[in-house]
Amino acid sequence: MKIQIEDKEFDLMLEYDQIKKRTRLLGIQLNVDYEDKVPVFIGVLNGSFLFMADLIKEIDISCELAFVKVSSYHGNDTSSGIVRELIGLDIDLKNRDVIIVEDIVDTGLTLIHILDTLKKLEPASINVCSLLLKPGSLQEDIEEITYVGFEIPNEFVVGYGLDYKGLGRNLKDIYRASTSPSET
Ligand code: IMP
């Protein structure tokens, strides 16, 4: 099935049914791994909102939930000129077991920044649960990525929380770009 968003055509890649089944398995694994703990699930907005909603329904151990957002703005005090700030965290993470919930890890640069920031808050442990991972795009190994829904090729995807030019987050299934978007 094909869909059109703005100037781009997308093909169906993962149906919601597959996503749900995989999410259920991730939940089972997390329930076992964190059996005696009360972890804090931290969703990274905007993309993770649907995955977090489905994942958390599979969790039957006691847990807390929070969302953060990475805001990027141009500054003069880093080599890249981009300064990223993590906003919205309202839970004390000291000595807590943290699970970062991501929609997708592409280059991994955003995640590395989030990990660096959260580690300074002295959690007892920190792991990442990402629905999608593009191994071919990852710039360095990130040992905290313990739970992955699907490894996908280095293609632009949209739907189930992920957007193209702000659109498509509401799509139930995940689609891949038929041709590479000029702007991602
Ligand atoms: P990274 O820093 O390159 O790992 O990517 C960070 C963010 O870019 C993700 O959290 C997404 O918001 C966005 N992103 C990366 N790849 C895609 C994609 O294929 N579709 C939609 N958004 C993406």
Image (spheres, grey):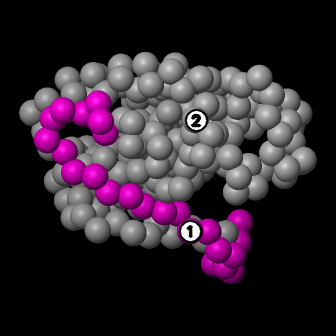
Label 2, on which residue? Answer: 172
Instruction: Quote the CA–CA distance across marks 2 and 1.
Output: 26 Å
Q: Position of residue 20 (x, y in %)?
A: 44, 25
Residue occupying the point 59% across, 23% down = 15
**Residue 74 colored magenta?**
yes
Side (left or right) of 97 relative to 151 = left
Precedes in sequence: disc 2 or disc 1: 1
Residue occupying the point 29% across, 36% down = 57
Q: Position of residue 167 (x, y in %)?
A: 71, 52
Quarter of image, res 157? top right
Residue flagged by tag 1: what amino acid is it? Ser
Residue occupying the point 45% across, 39% down = 51
Side (left or right) of 92 relative to 19 = left
Q: Position of residue 40 (x, y in %)?
A: 25, 49
In what element is the residue under mark 2?
loop
**Residue 125 colored magenta?**
no
Q: Quick one: label 1, few (<14), some, or many (20+) residues within 10 Å?
A: few
Picture layout, residue 84 above or below residue 168:
below
Between residue 111 and residue 87, name the one nearer to us: 87
Residue flagged by tag 2: what amino acid is it? Lys
In what element is the residue under mark 1?
strand
Quarter of image, res 171? top right
Side (left or right) of 117 relative to 123 = right
Between residue 178 and residue 83, name the one nearer to us: 178
Q: Residue furthest left?
A: 36
Q: Quick one: label 2, few (<14), some, or many (20+) residues within 10 Å?
A: some
Query: Can the viewer see residue 88?
Result: yes
Region in magenta: 56-81
Side (left or right) of 77 relative to 127 = right
Q: Nearer the viewer, mark 2 or mark 1?
A: 2
Name the mark on residue 71. 1
